[in-house]
Image: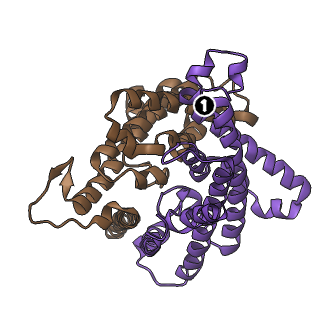
Chain colours: A purple, B brown
Amino acid sequence: MIKEIVLIIISVVFVNNFVLAKFLGLCPFLGVSQKTSSAMGMGVAVTFVMTLSSAITWIVYNFILLPGDANIIAKVFPSIRELGLIEVLKTISYILVIATLVQLVEMMLRKMVPALYESLGIYLPLITTNCAVLGVALLNTTDSPKHLGFLQATVQGFGAGVGFTVAMLLMSGIRERLALVNIPQSLRGIPIAFICTGLMALAFFGFSGMVQ
Amino acid sequence: MAEQNNLKEFTKGIVQYNPMFVLVLGLCPSLAVTTSVKNGVAMGGAATFVLICSNFIISVVRSFIPREIRIPCFIVVIAAFVTMVELLMKAYLPPDLNASLGIFIPLIVVNCIIMYRAESFAYKNKPLVSILDGAGLGLGWTLSLCLVSAIREILGAGTIFGLKVSESYQPASVMIMAPGAFIVLGLLLGFFNWRKLRKSEKSMKAYMKHD
């Protein structure tokens, strides 16, 4: 059990890093990686939302969307037992879960940890449209290569968030140095950030094969 | 006059407001699906359809949406059309194409281009111009997807639309993997920046001469 969880975390942080290998969450990755401090804040907030949304979307997937005896809605509308709602409601229900969750996190933080809330500022509401959050929810519930359990799905969500944070921190470190370097004018800003990301992705290839 | 304006709403999305190279939005799918031109066209088509439909619906109901909850409203409209596209593509396109686009079709929901147009154009303009705006930006995005994917497919697989380019070329498969995507897009963005800089320099020189 513990071995499996460690494997999931290593796989999703290093081998299949969401930003560098799966191209998810690139907009905040490039938008918020100017300074290490804001990169860290964004990473922590995203990790938090990803972990919670993985857990909740797993419950939604298994007890509301999938056809079968476990479906709660099928108890009221028997026709849903065979078909399920998976085809029509998956995307909409997931994005609603995420949007609600982000709103909830925002309210809780404002009440309980005002200092963190202040430092995250605009990045908090933007997490809703971070495709890494929706991406990990979708990947957790595709059932390929196998159906994930509740714990595995949650751990995968947490690991994906950690991987995102690691990539953000590395990138912000590079970009803080890039700001001082003499770069051709047309490559300044996003183009050189992309090229650096490409080289980072190449370096992360070294991890492939670590986990089968 | 009105027709000319409509035409402008359509063409501005292709060059002036090109979503990929000028606005630099919607990056995740631009990199993930551009391993071959076929994927690029399919992804561009799907996103264009969603963009046109969501722009139209949001523009029609814009006076009923309260300002405070507009973002959730946009997301629900967009998600409905994305679900439609997903079902249509599963029904009519070959399974291998669907498999290679994977989760990036449902992820159109969180594509910044669509949200950006809903927020900054459709919510403020009439339905007809909103449709034209959506079509223009969608076309611009599809064309840029084709450009990136053509470069990556030729360099990385030695083919274009699945046809071999040259017998002697040994494909560099890193180009169709993750690092190639980042580097190609970085260099392309740099190239377009360079062209813009040169143009403004030239017009500056012409202006000085004129003086």
Q: Quadrant of residue B117?
A: top right
Q: Residue at x 28, y 65 (%)?
A: B173
Q: Residue A44, image x and y in percent?
A: 72, 63
Q: Residue B139, image x and y in percent?
A: 36, 40
Instruction: Answer with left or right where residue B121 lies relative to residue B141.
Output: right
Q: Residue A212, image x and y in percent?
A: 46, 63
* Type of amino acid at the residue the image marks with label 1: Leu
Q: Residues within 10 Å of mark 1 (few under 14, many from 20)?
A: many
Q: Residue A173: in sight, yes or no? A: yes
- Residue B48's place in the image compared with B182, above or below, is above
Q: Residue at x 67, y 41 (%)?
A: A57
Instruction: Answer with left or right where residue A187 lies relative to residue B69.
Output: left
Chain bearing tag 1 is: A
Q: Residue at x 53, y 60 (%)?
A: A18
Q: Residue at x 41, y 27 (%)?
A: B88
Instruction: Answer with left or right where residue A211 lies relative to residue A50.
Output: left
Q: Quadrant of residue B57?
A: top right
Instruction: Answer with left or right where residue B205 lies relative to residue A111.
Output: left
Q: Quadrant of residue A69?
A: top right
Secondary structure beneath label 1 = loop
- Residue A78's place in the image compared with B168, above or below, is above
Q: Residue B1: in sight, yes or no? A: no
Number of labels in the image equals 1
- The residue under label 1 is A66
Q: Point out the residue furthest to the right here.
A: A111
Give whichever of A201, B76 is nearer the camera: A201
